[in-house]
Amino acid sequence: MRLTLMVSFFPLVVITSGCQPGAGNSGEIVIGHYGSMTGSEATFGQSTDNGIKLAVEEINEAGGIGGQKIRLITYDDKGDAREAGTAVTRLTTRDGVVAVLGEVASGLSLAGAPVCQEAGVPMVSPSSTNPKVTNIGDMIFRVCFIDPFQGAVCAKFAREHEGLKAGKAAILTDQGSPYSVGLQEEFEKAFTGLGGTIVSKQTYQGGDQDFSAQLTAIRSSEPDIVFVPGYYTDVGNVALQARKLGLKTPMLGGDGWDSSKLGEIAGEAIEGCFYSNHYSHEDPNPRVQAFIKKYAERYNQTPDGLAALGYDAARILFDAMQRAESLEGKALAAELSKTKDFDGVTGSISIDGDRNAVKPAVILEMKNGKPKFVTTIQP
Ligand code: PHE
């Protein structure tokens, strides 16, 4: 097995009659997390895991669920769809988890969700925004908004923000990423619906190193904005190359930009660019500030949106566990569906009939290598 086990491995969870699934003989409740702990989206998995761990520590300090402590098993899927499927299979079969948290990237949630659905184990994605993820079935939930909303948020911002008022947009999409492709479609629909024109549509493959052909074509289409719905490592490289080619147009993206690495990779090249996200660390809400303080004490870092979403996903799961009659999949899923007005760090969370959350989005601007709050856009 090439999977990295992040937490000490508990031999095999023995499920005996009279014992709840996932409650080992030590009286623990075992939950799983699969994420990209390494690879080009490593901060996605790491931040999410940090957020989840904080929530686990809190619930355990408070006595656990019905007197049983939570034990988290995290597997690194390395940002790879096959690894993601294997990790979830291992969690649901060998480890006997009662629920799974993950993934961040929609393409990886689409690989893990069918395994959870088949096994009858609830899965809560903290941050996958592609609508198809929760369509997999009634065991699959998320605590974030979805891309038809996020695409519209970006389009509205591009069209209306003072200093942008973009009429012409170029788009650069990662064609191998369901997230990127889906968000691009939603942006295009909304942007043209608001009277804008798409002047160039270019594609790349995640991990590409040379974007000069696409960026040259974009430059000659003279856009007012370049929409890049990709993940931070690629976006950073795109920005660097765009500026080298003399393409000075501001860039705009979605939540996939959310990483402290973006500013480190792109430096000056990403200054003044915008992206939509689930949370801003500048939100003065006391609940948000309390989380930031706790997280900073624990990890010596300012939490990004993924840390906040991981924390919220775990807390929603524990909340449902507290209410559930048993931790059996159907009973737990039924309680997850009833989540209403949960006071999350990323906003008030209610799970709708499609097992999605309806929440506002924020727009952030890169300034001195860091995301600065610009505005909130309501659903
Ligand atoms: N929404 C992205 C996806 O579905 C994942 C993501 C969420 C990345 C939040 C960064 C921050 O693939």
Image (tube, rainbow, N blue to C red):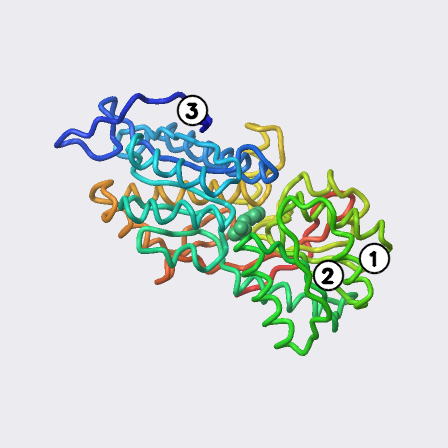
Q: How far apart are the two marked residues, 1 and 3, measured between alpha carbons?
A: 46 Å
Residue where numbered disc 2 is placed:
226
Instruction: Identify the mark nearer the N-term, 2 or 1.
Output: 2
Q: Decide: marks 1, 3 in contact (CB < 8 A)?
A: no
Give the number of the disc on residue 7.
3
Q: Residues within 10 Å of mark 1 (few under 14, many from 20)?
A: some
- Disc 3 secondary structure class: loop
Which residue corresponds to the image point at 21% horizontal and 41% vertical from the top-left? 326
Question: Eyeballing the image, is 326 above or below 219?
Answer: above
Residue where numbered disc 1 is placed:
247
- Name the residue nearer the viewer: 379 or 213: 213
- Disc 2 secondary structure class: strand
Q: How far apart are the two marked residues, 3 and 2, measured between alpha carbons?
A: 42 Å
Query: Does 46 sit left or right of 100 as displayed?
Result: right
Tag count in the figure? 3
Depth check, mark 3 against mark 2: the one in front is 2
Amino acid on which disc 2 is placed: Val
Instruction: Identify the mark nearer the N-term, 3 or 2.
Output: 3
Depth check, mark 1 against mark 3: the one in front is 1
Which residue corresponds to the image point at 26% horizontal and 33% vertical from the top-left? 22
Label 1 CB-ligand 1 distance < 8 A? no
Q: Decide: marks 3, 2 in contact (CB < 8 A)?
A: no
**Outermost residue, right direction?**
246
* Picture coordinates of residue 226, whole percent (x, y): 73, 61
